[in-house]
Image: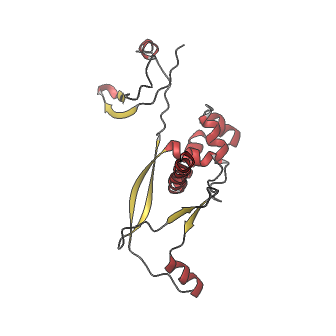
Amino acid sequence: MSYIEFKPVLKKVNLKPDGKQEIVLEVTNGTLNGKLDALSEMIDCKVEVSLESLEVNYSITINARTNKPMREYTVDDKGVVQELKPSHEQLEAELDVEEAKVPTKEEKQEADREIIDAFIISGMAPSYDDLPNDFANIVKRKLEGESYNKLANELGISSSEIVTFVGEYRQRVAPLAVKWNEWKEQQDEDADK
């Protein structure tokens, strides 16, 4: 039995005659180096494949007037990410004034899943009442090679549910993780000086 792991880019899905589907993967990152013989042995064999994106797509709300994000974040010296309250919101809250309707738009963003997962595993990511699982443990165990199926069985949910929950959680913490990663890189640069 042959086994290999590699990180391709999904390039295309083709629908073929007779209901067949062809998936085209492209590998340019060297993750197949030394594995081509094992891969070629699998040609025309049944194989098991699971694909998981290495990028996290999420949306941020932008103020349509200023073209700036509606939510901005700061990181303290311990690495805790907190949402910054704009000064007008703070003043409105103190005076108990109703917030004026600001025209907004959604902007798509993309982040490297490695950054998001590092943030989650660090223990700095927040928890949410509507997503009550221990995502730091789930993500850590998944990165160590455990399957979603095993993790889902332990939680008493289906594997598709755990994939959905982890995906939603990654999307929700993505803007915080990006800010945390910027802070972390700055800390590393300052330490190298």
Count of numbered circles on the image: 0
Would you place residue 54 above or below residue 66 in this image?
Answer: above
Q: Quadrant of the N terminus?
A: top right
Taking the spot 33% from the left edge, 34% from the top edge, the residue there is 12
**Residue 83 higher or lower than 9, as above or below:** below
Please provide percent x and percent y for residue 165: 58, 48
Depth check, front residue: 183 or 136: 183
Who's the residue at 41% across and 30% down the image?
A: 8
Nearest to the observer: residue 88 or residue 143: 88
Work out whether 36 lies above or below 65. Answer: above
Judging from the image, the colouring scheme is secondary structure
Question: x%, y% of residue 186?
Answer: 52, 52
Residue 14: percent from left, percent from top: 31, 32
Residue at figure coordinates x 41%, y 76% from the top left: 102
Of 13 and 71, which appears nearest the observer? 71
Q: Could you tell me residue 121's position as x and y percent?
A: 63, 45
- Residue at the limit of the structure toward the front, as seen here: 193
User: Where is residue 44, by image quadrant?
Assistant: top left
